[in-house]
Image (tube, rainbow, N blue to C red):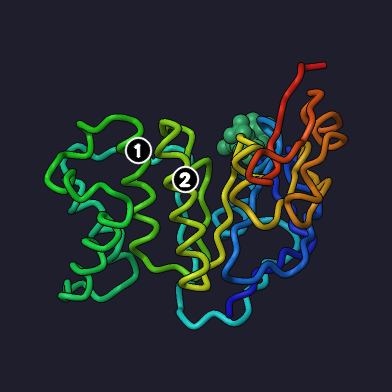
Amino acid sequence: MVTLTLDRLSAHYGRQPILSEVTTPGFEGGQIVALLGPNAAGKSTLFRRILGLLKGGGEVRISGAVTDRPMAYMPQDTGANAVLTVYESVLLARMQGRALKVQDDDLCEVDRALAELGIASLGERDIGDLSGGQRQLVGAAQALVQNPEILLLDEPTSALDLHRQIQLLSILRRLARERQMLVIAALHDLGHALRFTDQAMVLQKGRLVACGPTVEVVTPELLHRVYQVTARIEPCSKGRPQLIVEEAV
Ligand SMILES: Nc1ncnc2c1ncn2[C@@H]1O[C@H](COP(=O)(O)OP(=O)(O)OP(=O)(O)O)[C@@H](O)[C@H]1O
């Protein structure tokens, strides 16, 4: 099973340090990890550093991977290329780093990713003509179609309506379990983090200030210290932890 470990990871833009010595325990496949933290804390920068798109100190260690390209990434701004259909754009994502010739298997994987995300009916649409939420689901399909062992998602639910937010996070949790895939998702909704993620890491001003099981990390004390809100966490009628935010301090 794949394991990802971050060891004293740093990153900077020009002379400006952004991440300072981020160290985590090994995150194993089969689970979802929430990457939390306020605006500008360094979440997207951490993804770029993990992917090797940014240089810096420290080490990203991946063990137990069985493929040459174990990671796939869905950026915050998925962009849109108006000259491609949804189907073509997902197929193009599938073919990254593979032989140029499209095999039947590649087409099956595109069909599977679109069906999995409930957007098969959008296949022939130009991606430039989609709504923001539709485009975000296409971005998720472009990442999933690569069958990654480690899937990094930067705010994957930010443009989705409530139903689709829950649907996408449920799908990701199921796929993480079924495929023994490690999913790391930057999230701003801490209620979703509590409900759908196994572990959480919290960045504040480029430093890792908490890391561990989500229910142990997302506490009223952390919400006050990192997000400057007063909040309670109470079990709902089904016994799940539920976040009740009172006010910003
Ligand atoms: N290309 C860049 N050049 C210079 N500074 C940058 C660049 N990209 C990001 N930054 C700065 O790095 C810091 C961290 O940004 P980052 O996008 O990683 O934060 P984030 O936690 O993902 O924020 P958000 O929740 O708002 O998306 C911010 O101060 C930001 O202004």
Kind of residue at disc 1: Gly
Please give left or right for residue 156 compared with residue 124 in the image. right
Q: Which of 158 and 45 is in front in this view?
A: 158
Please count the marks in the image. Answer: 2
Spatial distance from mark 1 to mark 2, Cα to Cα?
A: 9 Å
**Residue at 45% of width from left, 64% of height from top?**
175
Please give left or right for residue 37 compared with residue 119 in the image. right
Q: Helix, strand, or loop for circle 1?
A: loop
- Give the quadrant of the N terminus: bottom right
Residue farthest to the left, as pictured: 124
Q: x%, y% of residue 225?
A: 86, 31
**Residue at 43% of width from left, 37% of height from top?**
77
* Image quarter of residue 163: top left
| 97 shown above or below 211 | below
**Residue at 29% of width from left, 64% of height from top?**
94
Q: Helix, strand, or loop for circle 2?
A: loop
Q: x%, y% of residue 110?
A: 24, 62
Q: x%, y% of residue 62?
A: 62, 74
**Residue at 31% of width from left, 57% of height from top?**
116
Name the mark on residue 237.
none
Is the residue marked by circle 2 packed among few (<14), some (14-19), or many (20+) residues within 10 Å? Answer: some
Instruction: Give yes or no for contact between labels 1 and 2 (Cβ–Cβ under 8 Å).
Output: yes
Kind of residue at disc 2: Pro
Which residue position is annotated with label 2?
Answer: 75
View quadrant of ligand 1: top right
Which residue position is annotated with label 1?
Answer: 79
Please give left or right for residue 98 compared with residue 78 in the image. left
**Is the CB of mark 1 within 8 Å of ligand 1?**
no
Q: x%, y% of residue 30?
A: 57, 69
